[in-house]
Image (cartoon, rainbow, N blue to C red):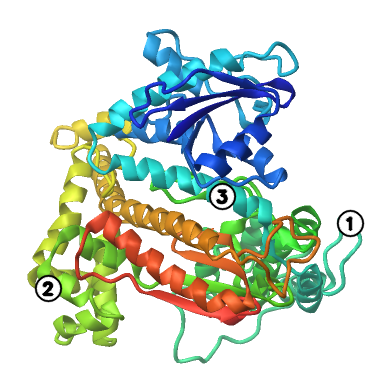
Amino acid sequence: MRIAVAAGPRGGGALRALAEDGSPAGPVQVVPDLVAAIAERERDDAPRWVWASTARLYPRLLDADVRVGRCHDLELVESLLLGHAGRYGEPRSVPAAWARLRGEPVPPDRPPQEESAQASLFDDDPGGRDDSADDIGRIVAVHAEQRRAIAGLDGFALLAAAESAGSLAAAEMGHDGLPWSAEEHDALLTELLGPRPPGGLRPRRLQDLADRINAAFEAPLGRPSSSPHQPPINRRAPLGRVMHVNPDSPAQILKAFASAGLPVPSTRAHVLKQLDHPAVPLLLEYKELARLHTAHGWAWLDTWVSGGRFRPEYVVGGVVSGRWATSGGGALQIPRVLRRAVVADPGWALVVADAAQLEPRVLAALAGDRAFTEAAAHGDLYAALSDAFRDGGGEGSARDKAKIALLSAMYGGGTGEAVQLLAILRSRFPDAFEYVESAARAGERGRLVRSRLGRTCPPPSAGWRELTSAGDDDTLPEPRQGSAARALRSRGRFTRNFVVQATAADWALALLASLRRRLTALAPSSSPHPPPVNRRAPLAVPRLVFFQHDEVIVHTPTELAGDVADAVRASADEARRLLFGDIPVVFPMEIAVVDRYADAK
């Protein structure tokens, strides 16, 4: 069963039962309390809810301790369908989709800050009249059109369901939050940076490094280094002094090195490491600590952690490949050093799981290369492939060479040792090699490529087409021909990786949807370790609390940790079967049950 939902003002709304094809299966039901009505129907019927946007409506349900099992997110699915048609960037809202259906001018999407779950889809006045009964008709029509379009696309129904399930998981993770110890975080910052400084001042450790950096630039340089392993850029400066260098200013750092006789093009770490100057190690340490202070320092702690939880704002499908993004908090860039602040509640544990060598395994499953598939049936894929590379040139183990060859094939590497290793890969695993080569050729021709389930890459820009259409014209100036060639190669690298990375994102979403369902089934009737009062989830139920590309964290009562680990493995296998059928490629999950995230790896 499916039930369409339209939110109205003052907490009300409208519902309508639908058949699987999207056609109405009952009358419109206007309800004064939408949350209560959804809770009742979820309990009685467990339908798939059809609504405009999970991100806007579901938090309202979660705040009332109402969770649903399934949904169809119209905006996310509209984005997928527009992408499949090569129409990236067009408005995806229900009003926009409704206008396209009627051949009317398409309104732009509202900025997120202007949207409200309480407001009617088509009414600019959320406190005004209740248009939810009219909105439900438009929602039903848009959903029916999406169902019609999906029916003609192989695999797309699973993609729409997985993307929508991901939207539920994202909202729940933002609501429940990742267990986070403010005390551990503060202690770590104090250990690395010194005590918390007054507003606007540098922490003591950063100030000390800034002073030492200035001193290093002020002092005359000594005799040249006698190291037998000189870096590529190793020029000693003439005697001179540079005063008052602000290490937060790249321009001042560049000027200081130039004044010391060491001109460099940037202050990137790999550039600085080529210099032989006493300020370099100090600058590298300063940059690392300053990045921590700026991105995850005390201000971040004050803003994003409350009640023992970090509650990020995930953006489902925020990257064209299907990977998620965040609209704040940097959940996808938690520094390794801060993982010790992610601490399970007393009586609870963290089950940390990530897919081992996911993208190469995805390539094996996509390509159907028999020899490659047989290798992917083993735990360590690179080790299983290593026999093919034992006679390859260059230094390093055969396993390392196998890894270089695979990553070069997927990401478009082709210089140095990688050229010889790619030749071995092509000879031993021709179907796997040809799969990504074909995607690269399609990209270079301006074509679209798709994931296993139909997620589609963006089309090239008009500027790209103009530049590359004349790339074979020998009468053009060499710089123009060179630019065209680089644009073609860049597009080819993008599409060769897209087919693998986007399919990996499909697999990860299927894993997430399956795991979310299995965790709900693990809910105990009672637990000796109820969640603390600051945890907003009302039951002692294992909860997904973190997701990043191919890694998940579940916060669980300790006595259920083993069951959760089994659920993760079963979900990985279910995701494999849903995407690829019964194939020998395995997708092993590396699982650790720990008290704190830092102990997992």
Task: Please tell me how crowded label 1 is: few (under 14), some (14-19), or many (20+) other residues with Cα within 10 Å.
Answer: few
Q: Which of the 4 image quadrants contains residue 444?
A: top left
In front: label 3 or label 2: 3
Left or right of 280 on screen, residue 457: left
The quadrant the N terminus occupies is: top left
Q: CA distance from mark 2 to mark 1?
A: 61 Å
Residue 269 coordinates in the image, percent (x, y): 55, 68
Residue 255 coordinates in the image, percent (x, y): 64, 58
Residue carrying label 1: 199
Give amino acid for label 1.
Gly
- Determine the residue positioned at 91% across, 61% down: 198
Q: CA distance from mark 3 to mark 2?
A: 38 Å
Left or right of 126 on screen, residue 41: left
Give amino acid for label 3.
Ala
Task: Please state which of residues 118 and 468 is positioned toward the viewer in this rendering.
Answer: 118
Residue 579 coordinates in the image, percent (x, y): 28, 55
Secondary structure found at label 1: loop
Task: Please state which of residues 544 and 525 is positioned toward the viewer in this rendering.
Answer: 525
2 or 1: tag closer to the N-terminus: 1
Q: Which of the 4 image quadrants contains residue 192?
A: bottom right
Secondary structure found at label 3: helix
Residue carrying label 2: 371
Q: Does residue 327 appear anywhere in the picture?
A: yes
Instruction: Say whether marks 1 and 3 touch (CB < 8 Å).
Output: no
Residue carrying label 3: 170
